Amino acid sequence: MIFAAGLGTRLKPLTDTMPKALVRVGGEPLLRHVILRLKDAGFERIVVNVHHFAQQIIDYLSANYNFGLDIRISDEREMLLDTGGGIKKALPLFDDASPILIHNVDILSNVDLAAFYSQAVRGDCEASLLVSKRSTSRYLLFDKRSMLVGWTNIKTGEVKSPWPSLNPAGLDHFAFSGIHVIAPSLFACFQEMPDKFGIVDFYLKYCENHPLKGFLKDDLQLLDVGKLDTLEQAELFLNEVKE
């Protein structure tokens, strides 16, 4: 699943006339870059959620014959459902016996998506979260088994966890990459949630009773193309990743 429904407010004024998914990097829309990476990794069915300038995305996919893939649209034009709600709405479009790989449309990386998916499928967890050591103010917290136990904002000191007395000290602090795999055994939990919610809040709610694991890629190269200044870096980044 490709998250492409966002408003792209950090990319204004470009997103005043187009969705973030169609903002170009290296002469091609972000959406194309992600689709082709997923296609190269062997994925055949892709769900794209849409909201902001939704018809532009639908028309773009149609004009490109869906890149020879089974591409399905999860339509959020009526209401933007956030990352967790977006997955919940899209679940009927997937094979309910297969894990789902989730990929933000504005993420460029050197991740071997086929290998990450295979590792997640073989693993002993219900969600596999690709994480890194990059500097940020908000971190997911993992125990020594790499299992998710909480979240913290190091600027404010806020901590979220099913364990009220959780102390971030001594835990691994990793940044979420926006790439993750969800096992079918977790699908039923989405039905217990409201229509609109964030996926990190979902993971924090269920990590107490469901094994949700962080996968650290030490040589991770990742660029969040969410701001105008990162657009200038993105073309160079793409060339470096290809090399």
Image (cartoon, rainbow, N blue to C red):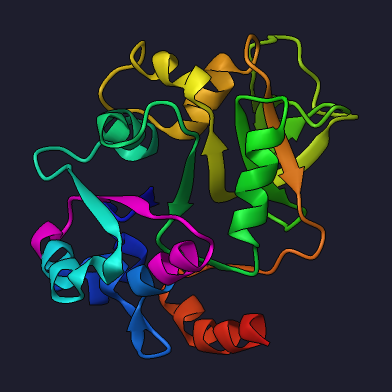
Specify whether 58 is left or right of 25: left
To which quarter of the image does residue 218 belong? bottom right
Q: Which residue is drawn at the image coordinates 68% and 20% (left, top)? A: 211
* Residue 182 position within the rendered picture, expressed as x and y whole percent measured from the top left: 52, 33
Q: Kindly identify the residue that appears in the image at 65 percent across and 30 percent down.
A: 151
39 in relation to 185, above or below? below
Quadrant for residue 69, please give it. bottom left
| Residue drawn at the location 41% of the way across and 14% of the way down | 188
User: Does residue 54 show up magenta in the picture?
Assistant: yes
Front position in the image: 35 or 76: 35
Q: Is residue 174 left or right of residue 44?
A: right
Q: Image point 20% across, 75% down: which residue? A: 64
Q: Nearer the viewer, residue 211 or 168?
A: 211
Q: Is residue 155 visible?
A: no
Residue 4 drawn in magenta: no
- In the image, residue 12 lies at what x, y percent? 28, 71
Query: Where in the figure is residue 160, as x and y percent of width and height?
Result: 61, 22
Judging depth in this view, the residue of 64 and 109 nearest the camera is: 64
Q: Is residue 203 visible?
A: yes
Quadrant in the picture for residue 170 = top right
Viewer-closest of 227 and 45: 45
Placement of 117 over or under 126, stated as above or below: below
Quarter occupied by the C terminus = bottom right
Instruction: Report the span colored magenta.
Output: 34-55
Residue 138, placed above or below residue 13? above
